[in-house]
Structure formats: structure tokens, C-alpha cells
Image (cartoon, coloured by chain):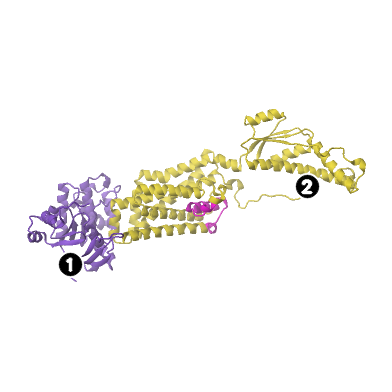
Chain colours: A yellow, B purple
Amino acid sequence: MLRLYSTIQKEILILLRDRGGLMIMFIMPMAMITLMALIQDAPFRDYQEMRIPLLLVNNDKGSLGSTIDSGLNESKIFEITNLQLDKDVVKQKMKSGDYEIAIIIPAGASTMLNSKVSSFVTKKLNEVGFSDSAAIAKTDLNQELNLEILFSPETKKAFKASILSTLKQATSKIETQTLLELFNKELKQDDEAKSGKAEPMRDFVNFREINTVETPAEALKLNSVQHNVPAWTIFGMFFIVISMSGSIIRERDEGSYTRILTMPGLYITVLGGKIAAYLLICLIQCFLMLMVGIYILPQFGLPQLVIGNSIPAISIVAITAGLAATGYGILVGTIFKTHQQASTFGAISVIILAALGGIWVPVFVMPESIKIFAEFSPLYWGLSAFHKLFLNEGTIKSILPYAFKLVLFFVFTLSFALLYTKNNRS
Amino acid sequence: MNDNAAIEVKNLLKTYKGATVPAVNSISFTIEKGSIFGLLGPNGAGKTTTISILCGLSKATNGDATLMGLSLKKQLAEIKQLIGVVPQEIALYPTLTAFENLRYVGNMYGLRGANLRKKIKDNLEVVGLSEFADKKIETFSGGMKRRINLVAGILNDPKILFLDEPTVGVDVQSRNLITEHLHQLNNAGCTIVYTSHLMEEAENLCTAIAIIDHGQILALGEPKALIKEHSTGNLEQLFLKLTGKKLRD
């Protein structure tokens, strides 16, 4: 126990006196969190919150125009401006970047739609002998009713699809309503129908949005803060690979390793002390990063980090991720001969594992072929566990599979390092 | 088993992985308790390999050795409590102070508290570094580092002390202090095993020597007796006579 305690004390003293190392371990990840959260705020808002400026030129005085208007408003995707403008002016405004999308509804669109539906229904009823020839529509069914939609080149496919869907929905609603009214009138089913007024069309299926967690939905959206804080916390923890492998290599180069091996006790005790010291650093790092998310980032106008309600579960994720990082640090420090080799490999490998693990960009936006590799990144396991806790109000049980994988990674890397050391000494 | 032997080496063989020639080729020798034994040889002769095996740093391919009657193969943990090692490198943490370095080494031997502090204080006094106890090693001169390196090796009052070129690169004053201190330790009953390229120092310091080359012992005995036996003027001439004048890597 004395050996373990003494090694922890020695490692902490060395770390505290290494200002460059402290910068890498604490200041850099904190700066990264702040910077990345700020940089990625707009793309995340774009993805989830930002509204697209849309110009609606509604020349129609009837129900079609108003249904389209209300449908677009209900979608909450668009920032709608209603103006009466010529097509050329609309084009000009699109070119100047004032609007990304414009919709022009021609004058009399509702009347024309009603007439077309009416003609179609009357024609069909006539064919089956339900109507008299006098009621045959005068409207030409081949006459075109065109709603004009203008998209700027940078409009995303999703927004185009949303616009077309809203327009389809609006026109369908009007068409159905008109059809019902005509059928009621022709079939003369009741007194109300005789008057030519049918009950307004209702939605028979309602859609309700239900949160799967109790925290207000607004707080649990995967925004820039909810992604970047846990992501860069995990990254920062794994970045201790550089300091840790450097410490092992320095010990070897300076001869302390030789002295340690000639002293009583097992080498694993010395490694245990090193692991404990660096694990402590990881936990302090994690605590500070989460504090940045909760207290510092809101000062920059970013949302506050929501960490869920299971502190024990967060501690388990932090400890297991820290263990995985220290295990990896020992492995890199054991295998590589020089500090330069270890720091280069350590940094690049952590960056690759971070990229695969969804630290830079969330895994769900990655191509399917890359998503497969994410499953093998310990940074992904750590980040997924944090997301479970922060976004889904996960419990200890829900993060156990990730914690287990992280511990397994630690055991594997440490065992490999010990085996490598043993083989090299024999 | 020789009760008077501090170290008994029997047919010690070490062949490194991929090597065709053994680094140590079935050597046998005995080091008496209370002696200062010099293991001398040119670069690559096998002396560091021999010491590494005896300290438990490396495993012998074949053969065995006993240290204070304990088998190297079977009782390494007990042996480690009895030995002290002063490596050729300055095996200290540069950003820690002399006291912090020595406290760590002492703790690793199970020493603690007032007893450890007294040992550190006494030893620093002997090597003339009392006033530098709280200074970082990185601020020390080469000679000062060598002296602290020596203290770190003897903090546990070893029965056998291994030193790998303990005076390399130090000034005359520091070298003098180190050799004087080694004499004191030896007088107190510590058996010293020492390697060096400095023949004059070895001739004056050692009570017995082994000249080793190509993994084999070429001469073994008291320095004066060996010089007489081979009719050479001093140890350096004897060394050159036995190992040749050809340059080594």
C-alpha cells in the first residue's frame, strides 16, 4: 500500500510541475469545448431549430391560399413573409439572398380548384346516372392550375420535400372538402346537405408529440452544448495518452524504470500508482468540463448543459472512460521507444478514434459504412454513455454495457502492455 | 554452498533473442562477503548483462546464481530486499527535489516516517548535499546527480550493492567522495559489485576482479596477484594483454 501511495504522490508531484502537460490536460480541452460549442452552434440550430426564410405571394383570396399559409406556419420550419409582388421582383429578392424559398399562388386558384373538382365529380356521377345532364361542368378539366415554387440553389432536399408535402396536403384537403360537399349536394342525404353546406372536413387522425423523458424537451435536444461538452470531455480524457506515455518513456530513458525493477514489489503496483494518479486527473478534467458546460457556455449565449439526474451513473462513465484512457496510455508508452513516436501515434490515434467515435460530428450523420467502425471506438462508448444520461435521462443500468466495454478495453490494453514488458525483459 | 559467499554464479548463460552468440557464456564465479568486486571488460563484453541478471532485471537463459544464499530463480523477491543498485544512468526524477526522490525510493523499500527522514538526512550529509535536499534534481551538476544517485542505491542499507560505472563523467572531487563512501560502506559490511572502464580506480578500490570478454571470464582474482601472475605493470596493461588492443563498438 505504501508503494502504491508513494507512486501516486510521486506522479501527482511530477504532473503538477509540468506546466505544458497541465495545459494539454486542462486548458486545451476547456478551450476546445468552448470553441467547438460556439462553432457548431449554428449547424446544430440549422439542423434542429433554425427557420428558413420563405416568401409567400398569395394572390388567391380563397381557401387554398389560406390553407397553404396555415400549413406552412404549422410546420414551424419556415419564417414566412406574406407579400404581394410580381414574379420578377420575387426572383430578384431570391437572387439577392433575402429568401431561400418563394411560393406564388395565382389569383383565383381556389375557385379554379373547386371548379375542376366539381367538373370531375359531376362527370363521374353522370357516368353512373346519379346526376342530370344540366349539371355537367362547364370547366375544362385539362385547364392547368400551377402553384409556382422557387428554390435557391442551396436549399436542402429536406426543405424542398417539406414544402412540397405541405402544398400537397393543403390541396388534398381542399379537394377532399369540395368532393364531400358535392357528394352531399348530389345525393341529398339530409336537410343540411340540401342547403349545400356539409360539415367541415375534420382530421380523423391526430398526431401527438410525447417526450420520452420528464425533463422539458427543449433542454434535451441534441444541441451544440449537449453534443460538444460530453464529446470533448471524453476526448480530453483520452488525450492524457500523450502525457502518460511520455511519463513511461521518460522513466525508461532516464533509468528510473531500471531502478524500479530492481526494487522490491511488483511492477504492476507502480503501474497501479500511475493509473490512479492519471485517473484522478481524468476525473478532475471531467468535472471541470461539465462545469464549463453548465456555467461558462451559457455566458456565451449557448444553452446550458443538462446532465440528467444520475450523478452515480455519470461517475461510473467518468471512471470507466478514465480507466480506458490510462490503459491506452500505458500501452502506447510501453510499445513505443521514443517520446516523439509515442506522442505522434498517441495524438493521431486518439484523433482517429475521436472522429470514428462521433466526437467531431455525431455518428448519426455519418455514412453507414463509417458507422460500423464507430462501434469499435472507446470514445464512442464513452460518448454514447454520456448521451444516454444527458439526453435520455438514463440510469446506471442503461450505461452498464458501455461501462463494461470501457473496462474491458482497459483490461485488454493493460494486459497487453504487461505481456509486452515481460517478453521484452526475458 | 559456500557460507562466506555473497554471490555464487554457476554456469550462467544468456543469449538474447535473435542473437547467435551468447552475451554471457556459461560463466561461474564466487564473490566473497565483504569484498569489493570489480567486473571489468571492454564494451559489449557481457558485464552489464551479468549485473542485470544478478539484479533481477533480466532472466538467464540457463544456469543460476545465489545471493546471500538465496536462489535468483526462486527467491528474487527476497533478494531485492537485500540488494541496492546504482545504475549508470541518473535514475532520478528531474522535476522532483532530492528529498522527494529519496523519499520515493525509501518508500519503495518499505521505509517511512522519521526513520526514513533520518536516513535521507544522514546520507545527504555524507555526500555533502544536505543543503540541496529541497532543490530539484534538474538544477544539480553532473557530480551532484551522481552522488544522489548513489544515495538512492544505498538507502535500504543493502547487503550487496551493484554499481554500474558510478563515477563516469564526474569531477575528481566527486569521484574521490564517491570512492571514499564506497570504502566506508564496505567497511560496514556491504559487499560491492562494481563495473568500470577506469582501471586505476578499479585497481585501488577492488579487493577482487574478474576480467570478462565475449561473455567469458578471462581472469579472476585479487588485482595485485593477477598483475604479478601475468607479469604486467598495472591493471590497465593486464586488461589490454587479455582483451587485446582492437577497438570495440
The C terminus of chain A sits in image quarter: bottom left
Q: Chain of mark 2?
A: A
Give the residue at the far bottom of this rendering. Answer: B1
Q: Are marks 2 and 1 on the same chain?
A: no
Q: What x and y, as percent, mark residue A358?
A: 52, 48
The N terminus of chain A sits in image quarter: bottom left
User: Which quadrant holds residue A29?
Assistant: top left
* Pointer 2 residue: A202
What span is in magenta? A371-399
Q: What x and y, as percent, mark residue B143?
A: 20, 47
The verdict on residue B122 being magenta is: no
Q: Is residue B69 visible?
A: yes
Which of discs 2 and 1 lies nearer the camera? The answer is 1
Q: Is residue A76 visible?
A: no
Q: Is residue B114 left or right of residue A316?
A: left
Q: Amino acid at mark 2?
A: Arg
* Pointer 1 residue: B5
Q: Is residue B16 left or right of residue A352?
A: left
Density class for disc 1 (Cα within 10 Å; few <14, some 14-19, many ≥20) is some
At mark 1, the secondary structure is strand
Kindly report the secondary structure that dominates the magenta region of the rendered protein. Answer: helix
At mark 2, the secondary structure is loop
User: Which quadrant holds residue A258?
Assistant: bottom left
Q: CA distance from mark 2 to mark 1?
A: 106 Å
Q: What x and y, as percent, mark residue A165?
A: 70, 43
Q: Amino acid at mark 1?
A: Ala
